[in-house]
Image (cartoon, helix red, strand yellow):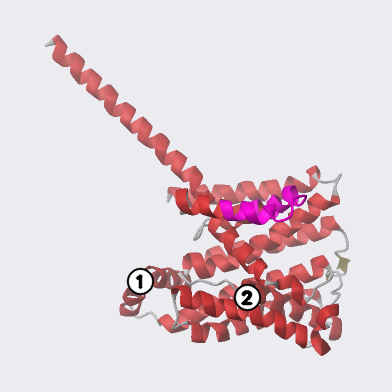
């Protein structure tokens, strides 16, 4: 219960900082650009957290779901004149359908076998997009237009930032409600023990496929937002490094945590901004951060505040007992 209260407070603090963030970045559009990118990664990591953190399944091919969402949105808006709002919903639904299809054969796999299967999917999709140049543009890529909602053109960094923030808040609320509901409880039960989940009447194969579908849906939404935010997409933008980066965000931030995806996205999006002058340094720091977190903070950086609080409570408890012992010792000496 206390952990949930801390996480809810953390979400409110993040929202407050996010709302005030543009005030501190008016002098630099690159800072606002990075902030928008952080929000997009928060959505992706939230989607991955549903699969790994709450469902206990592994995926190292999530960049492919991101690519599918981006290309679906770009193709619908450019070729069919569909509005951005409808395109982002369709991107999520199409990606969710593909995620469900991918999840069906994956339900019989686990551990490193599932990791290899998702890796194969992650490698295959960019190659398909590259060869299907009649639709995707191949090497030339596509140039999605800026989002237009109710006649408002989101053509500035500030407008795009607040659009990304609004979508991030909606996605976070939807995922939190999902996890608290019957579907979320089924996911957690499967993560804890598939045998026990089956004995409770949970259709494990169906819910495993559903995990992939839900996770893919939110990643597809992020892909749509990414495409219209960047303004250009090509198959090389969705390589396997993106999948590893998002996985690292989920692990470093903290799996099965509300605030974890936000912390992970913040850390691993801003690290390259300070280390881009040294080639490869950001990858090294990411690897080092993952090793440190896995060794000393298995529950991620989101667990730090809880650890400090428990430590202070133990100190207060020990101090209380020490005072009691002193009082008893004083009573004995008087007697």
- Is residue 260 something one can see in this rendering? yes
User: Which residue corresponds to the image point at 39% horizontal and 70% vertical from the top-left?
Assistant: 189
Q: Residue 319 falls in which quadrant of the image?
A: top left
Secondary structure under badge 2?
A: helix
Counting labels gives: 2
Residue 9: horizontal and vertical position, in percent? 56, 47
Is residue 125 shown above or below 324? below
User: Which residue corresponds to the image point at 83% horizontal and 79% vertical from the top-left?
Assistant: 139
Label whose residue precedes the other's in the sequence (1 or 2): 1
Q: Residue 205 falls in which quadrant of the image?
A: bottom left
What label sits on residue 119 in the rendered view?
Answer: none
Magenta stretch: includes residue 11:
no
Residue 234: horizontal and vertical position, in percent? 79, 75
User: Which residue corresponds to the image point at 17% horizontal and 15% vertical from the top-left?
Assistant: 331
| Magenta-colored segment: predominant secondary structure | helix
Give the mark toward the camera: 1 or 2. Answer: 1
- Is residue 258 something one can see in this rendering? no
Mark 1 is surrounded, within 10 Å at the Cα level, by few (under 14), some (14 to 19) or many (20 or more) other residues, namely few
User: Which residue corresponds to the image point at 37% horizontal and 32% vertical from the top-left?
Assistant: 315
Dividing the image into 4 quarters, which one contains the C terminus?
Answer: top left
Residues rendered magenta in the picture: 267-288
What label sits on residue 217 in the rendered view?
Answer: 2
Q: Would you say 327 lies left or right of 299 here?
A: left
Q: CA distance from mark 1 to mark 2?
A: 25 Å
What label sits on residue 193 in the rendered view?
Answer: 1
280 and 304: which is toward the camera: 280
């Amino acid at each position: 219960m206390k952990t949930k209260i801390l996480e809810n407070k953390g979400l409110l603090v993040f929202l407050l900082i996010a709302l005030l963030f543009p005030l501190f970045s008016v002098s630099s559009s690159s800072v606002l650009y990075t902030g928008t990118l952080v929000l997009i990664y928060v959505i992706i990591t939230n989607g991955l957290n549903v699969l790994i953190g709450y469902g206990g399944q592994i995926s190292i091919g999530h960049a492919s779901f991101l690519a599918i969402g981006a290309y679906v949105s770009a193709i619908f808006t450019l070729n069919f004149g569909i509005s951005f709002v409808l395109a982002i919903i369709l991107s999520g639904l199409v990606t969710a359908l593909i995620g469900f299809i991918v999840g069906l054969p994956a339900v019989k796999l686990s551990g490193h076998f599932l990791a290899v299967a998702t890796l194969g999917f992650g490698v295959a999709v960019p190659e398909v997009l590259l060869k299907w140049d009649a639709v995707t543009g191949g090497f030339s890529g596509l140039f999605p237009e800026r989002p237009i909602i109710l006649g408002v053109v989101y053509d500035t960094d500030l407008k795009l930032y607040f659009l990304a923030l609004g979508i991030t808040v909606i996605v976070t609320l939807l995922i939190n409600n999902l996890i608290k509901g019957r579907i979320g409880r089924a996911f957690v039960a499967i993560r804890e023990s598939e045998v026990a989940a089956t004995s409770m009447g949970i259709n494990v194969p169906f819910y495993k496929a559903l995990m992939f579908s839900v996770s893919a849906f939110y990643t597809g939404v992020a892909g749509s937002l990414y495409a219209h935010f960047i303004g250009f997409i090509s198959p090389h933008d969705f390589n396997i490094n993106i999948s590893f980066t998002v996985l690292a965000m989920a692990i470093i931030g903290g799996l099965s945590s509300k605030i974890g995806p936000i912390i992970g996205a913040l850390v691993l999006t801003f690290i390259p901004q300070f280390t881009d002058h040294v080639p490869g340094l950001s990858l090294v720091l990411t690897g080092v951060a993952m090793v440190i977190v896995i060794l000393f903070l298995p529950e991620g950086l989101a667990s730090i505040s809880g650890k400090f609080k428990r430590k202070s409570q133990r100190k207060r408890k020990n101090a209380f007992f020490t005072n009691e012992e002193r009082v008893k010792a004083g009573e004995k000496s008087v007697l």
